[in-house]
């Protein structure tokens, strides 16, 4: 009885070929893992820039796909639908703005100097953008979406309250140090300072020159500090 010769398994052939390549000194090609098609933080930053420039309604999924380099299924898989991506973008903006401001709010500086630094950083943020000043995400786009979306409204109001609280802490500290009159109300001053932040954001988006914006800031500081000191 003739015994049939078994064919070598495919894995054996591959191993044999690899051995021959190694013996000849030739480079053995490495198997590549599946590359990651995107970096989430970079893609989110691109989406943030687009939403901040054009707002929610005017930004299409095709726009987002082109900006992030991700097709629609990949966008949905990574971030959810357009609204979820918008909310994640707004959260990212809030986190970035907080990181840029937190040290200045905490620094032990005279109140006038502290306000000058806070407003200067705000102007740096609002006037940034490759295609022109982008203003403030909260004021320019999130506030509009807050009208109909309770979740975004809650985020916007939380952002306003957070800014008021940070300014109030600055004015309270200045009052304790005798820089402000004993009758000064830190809460009222904080709201006026926040209102100044919002107005320079709107005017920056309208491309008002920085010099003019700085003049508004200086006038506001004079009122906030000067009036409260008398």
Image (tube, helix red, strand yellow):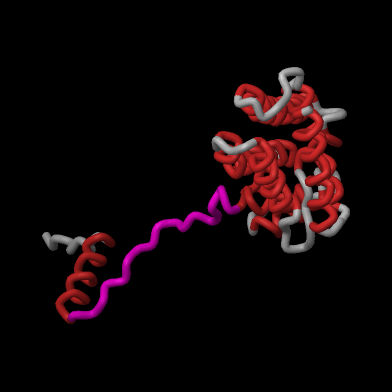
> Is residue 194 in view from this perspective?
no
Q: Is residue 26 magenta?
A: yes
Q: Residue at x 20, y 61 (%)?
A: 6
Residue 24, horizontal then vertical, whole percent? 17, 81
Residue 140, relative to residue 69: is it above or below? Answer: above
Main SS of the magenta part reads loop
Residue 190, relative to residue 82: is it above or below? Answer: above
Q: Residue at x 23, y 80 (%)?
A: 26
Residue 133, horizontal then vertical, whole percent? 78, 56
Residue 111, horizontal then vertical, whole percent? 66, 36
> Is residue 221 in view from this perspective?
yes
> In this view, which residue lies farthest toward the front?
230
Q: Residue at x 61, y 41 (%)?
A: 101
| Front residue of 217 and 127 | 217
- Quarter placement of the N terminus: bottom left
Residue 3, horizontal then vertical, whole percent? 14, 60
Magenta highlight range: 25-42
């Amino acid at each position: 009885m003739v015994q049939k010769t078994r064919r070598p398994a495919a894995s054996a052939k591959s191993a044999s070929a690899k051995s021959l390549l190694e013996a000849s000194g030739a480079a053995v090609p490495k198997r590549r893992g599946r590359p990651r098609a995107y970096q989430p933080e970079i893609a989110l930053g691109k989406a943030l820039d687009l939403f901040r420039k054009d707002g929610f309604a005017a930004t299409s999924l095709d726009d987002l796909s082109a900006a992030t380099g991700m097709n629609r299924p990949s966008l949905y898989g990574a971030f959810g639908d357009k609204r979820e991506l918008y909310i994640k973008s707004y959260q990212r903006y809030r986190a970035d703005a907080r990181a840029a401001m937190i040290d200045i709010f905490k620094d032990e500086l005279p109140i006038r100097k502290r306000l000058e630094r806070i407003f200067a950083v705000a102007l740096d943020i609002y006037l940034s953008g490759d295609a022109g000043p982008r203003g403030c995400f909260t004021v320019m786009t999130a506030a509009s979406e807050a009208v109909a979306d309770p979740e975004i409204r809650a985020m916007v109001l939380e952002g306003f309250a957070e800014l008021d609280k940070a300014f109030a802490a600055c004015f309270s500290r200045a009052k304790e140090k005798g820089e402000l009159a004993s009758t000064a109300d830190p809460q009222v001053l904080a709201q006026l300072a926040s209102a100044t932040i919002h107005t320079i954001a709107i005017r920056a988006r309208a491309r008002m020159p920085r010099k003019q914006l700085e003049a508004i800031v200086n006038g506001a500081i004079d009122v906030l500090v000067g009036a409260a000191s008398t």
